[in-house]
């Protein structure tokens, strides 16, 4: 049972990391519930989530069959945690304890975070804004790399609306804290992302085919959509 012991080590490591950062009570709020953001959720009893069927479905966890591909070669850039392998990796079920809605404020005591529901990348995607510190946590809704608008559950029309909203909200922040690729980037990207969603839907916009999907290129990021594009099927 070497693999099982390894999995336990990884699970303990995840919670102890948070414990090393603070003695205060901890609540988890995922930027969205894709499998690669919720693997440690089951370790915490206070979990915020959007009220949606999508969230409820993801809270049931993912079997090894469903997620093994994503810890295989080409997906993971660093060594796996001790004992975790392609054959034993799973995303365990979790339970949302508190429903969170658009516009809600999370008062941390001397610091307020406002929640905005921004569906598009995923139906339950949210961003958090700290207006005083001029920061926005963008999750996967923006990072300076390939943005995924082609997944099951993604919606380009909603993503465009959310990008517009994020661009407007972006006037209140200076820095974005994305969940992949870069930890800290300029909020100028939000206007560029909104513009990109409009530009790529124009007739004749240039793209390349990547693994059967379309990839539209912009300055510092790209956007993946299905082929044919959803706006051509409306
Ligand atoms: Zn995601």
Image (cartoon, rainbow, N blue to C red):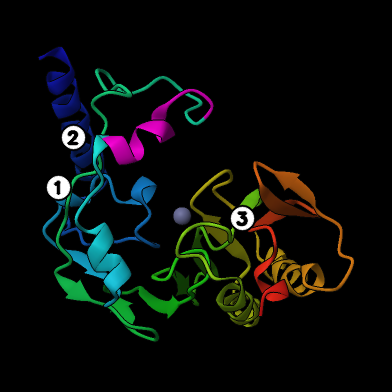
Residue to which mark 1 is pinned: 43
Are the residues at dot 1 and dot 2 in contact (C-beta closer than 8 Å)?
yes
Image spot of residue 182 (x, y percent)? 58, 45
Return the residue nearer the eye: 49 or 18: 49
Q: Is residue 109 left or right of residue 2?
A: right
Q: Please tell me which of labels 1 and 2 falls first in the chain.
A: 2
- Secondary structure, mark 3, is strand
In the rendered view, would you say 81 is above or below 162? above
Residue neighbourhood size for the residue with mark 2, other residues' Cα within 10 Å, grouped as few (<14), some (14–19), many (≥20): some
Residue to which mark 3 is pinned: 147
Residue to which mark 2 is pinned: 11
Q: Residue at left 19%, top 37%?
A: 16
Image quadrant of residue 112?
Answer: bottom left
**Dividing the image into 4 quarters, which one contains the N terminus?**
top left
In the rendered view, would you say 86 is above or below 23? above
Q: Is residue 207 magenta?
A: no
Image spot of residue 104 (x, y percent)? 34, 84
- Mark pair 1, 3: CA separation: 29 Å
């Amino acid at each position: 049972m070497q693999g099982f012991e390894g999995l336990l080590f990884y699970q303990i490591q995840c919670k102890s990391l948070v414990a090393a950062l603070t003695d205060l009570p901890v609540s988890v709020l995922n930027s969205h519930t894709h499998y690669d953001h919720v693997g440690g959720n089951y370790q915490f009893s206070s979990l915020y989530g959007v009220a949606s069927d999508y969230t409820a479905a993801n809270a049931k966890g993912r079997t090894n069959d469903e997620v093994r591909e994503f810890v295989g070669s080409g997906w993971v850039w660093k060594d796996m945690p001790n004992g975790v392998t392609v054959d034993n990796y799973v995303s365990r079920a979790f339970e949302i304890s508190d429903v969170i809605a658009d516009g809600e404020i999370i008062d941390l005591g001397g610091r307020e975070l406002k929640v905005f529901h921004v569906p598009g990348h995923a139906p339950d995607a949210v961003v958090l804004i700290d207006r005083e510190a001029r920061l926005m946590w963008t999750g996967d809704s923006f990072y300076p790399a390939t943005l995924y608008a082609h997944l099951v559950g993604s919606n380009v029309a909603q993503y465009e609306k959310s990008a517009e909203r994020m661009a407007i909200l972006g006037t209140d922040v200076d820095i974005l804290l994305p969940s992949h690729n870069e930890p800290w980037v300029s909020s100028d990207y939000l206007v560029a992302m909104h513009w990109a969603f409009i530009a790529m839907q124009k007739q004749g916009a240039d793209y390349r085919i990547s693994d059967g999907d379309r990839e539209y290129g912009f300055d510092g990021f790209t956007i993946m959509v299905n082929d044919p594009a959803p706006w051509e099927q409306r």
